[in-house]
Image: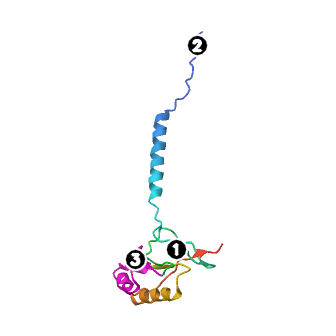
């Protein structure tokens, strides 16, 4: 009896479709990392604190910043201390409740106090300040 011996073929992997999938994934990751929300418009040297905590980046804060020249900005827009109270009152309630203060370590204490007074007059109750962890 003669039995026919079949030769097994090696499985074929179609590489072209794998390359297409990898290119699509690469494009997805490149595009999704460009949407990361940073705040490069204001360069501030934050003071160090022993009690500083890393907050999740997903929190959307309305940010009042005071730079080393005592210039005040609300979400990157320059605003005077006198107009700050009205500008904060015009913010929606959710953004006003998450408002935070970001002051440069070289900013004058008087300017920071004026900003804090304007924010309290605008109805901001809880005012966290951004700091950075000690090294």
What residue appears at the point 49 percent right and 78 percent down from the top-left corner? Answer: 67
The residue that label 1 is drawn on is: 44
Q: Residues within 10 Å of mark 3 (few under 14, many from 20)?
A: some
* The N terminus, quarter of image: top right
Q: Give, as a single range, the part of the protein colored magenta.
A: 70-98
Residue 71 belongs to magenta span: yes
Closer to the eye: label 2 or 1 = 1
Q: What SS does tag 3 mark?
A: strand
- Mark 2 and mark 3 lie on one chain; the one further toward the N terminus is 2
Vertical side of 24 occupied by 108: above or below: below
Q: Where is residue 18 in the image (x, y as percent from the top left)?
A: 49, 38
Closer to the eye: label 2 or 3 = 3
- Judge from the rendering whether residue 51 lies leftward or rightward of residue 78; answer left or right: right
The residue that label 2 is drawn on is: 3
Q: Considering depth in this image, is 20 or 39 the residue closer to the camera?
A: 39
- For the residues labelled 2 and 3, say whether their Cβ atoms are less than 8 Å apart: no
Quadrant position of residue 96:
bottom left
Q: Residues within 10 Å of mark 2 (few under 14, many from 20)?
A: few
- Mark 2 and mark 1 lie on one chain; the one further toward the N terminus is 2
Q: Where is residue 129 in the image (x, y as percent from the top left)?
A: 52, 80
The residue that label 3 is drawn on is: 78
């Amino acid at each position: 009896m003669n039995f026919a011996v079949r030769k097994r073929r090696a499985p074929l992997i179609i590489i072209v479709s794998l390359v297409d999938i990898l290119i699509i994934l690469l494009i997805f990751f490149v595009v999704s990392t460009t949407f990361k929300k940073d705040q490069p418009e204001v360069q501030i040297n934050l003071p160090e604190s022993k009690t500083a905590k890393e907050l999740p980046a997903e929190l959307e804060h309305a940010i009042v910043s005071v730079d080393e020249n005592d210039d005040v900005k609300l979400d990157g827009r320059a605003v005077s201390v006198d107009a700050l109270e009205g500008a904060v009152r015009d913010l929606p309630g959710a953004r006003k409740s998450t408002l935070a203060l970001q002051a440069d370590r070289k900013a004058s204490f008087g300017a920071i106090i004026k900003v804090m007074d304007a924010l309290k007059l605008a109805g901001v109750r809880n005012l966290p300040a951004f700091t950075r962890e000690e090294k």
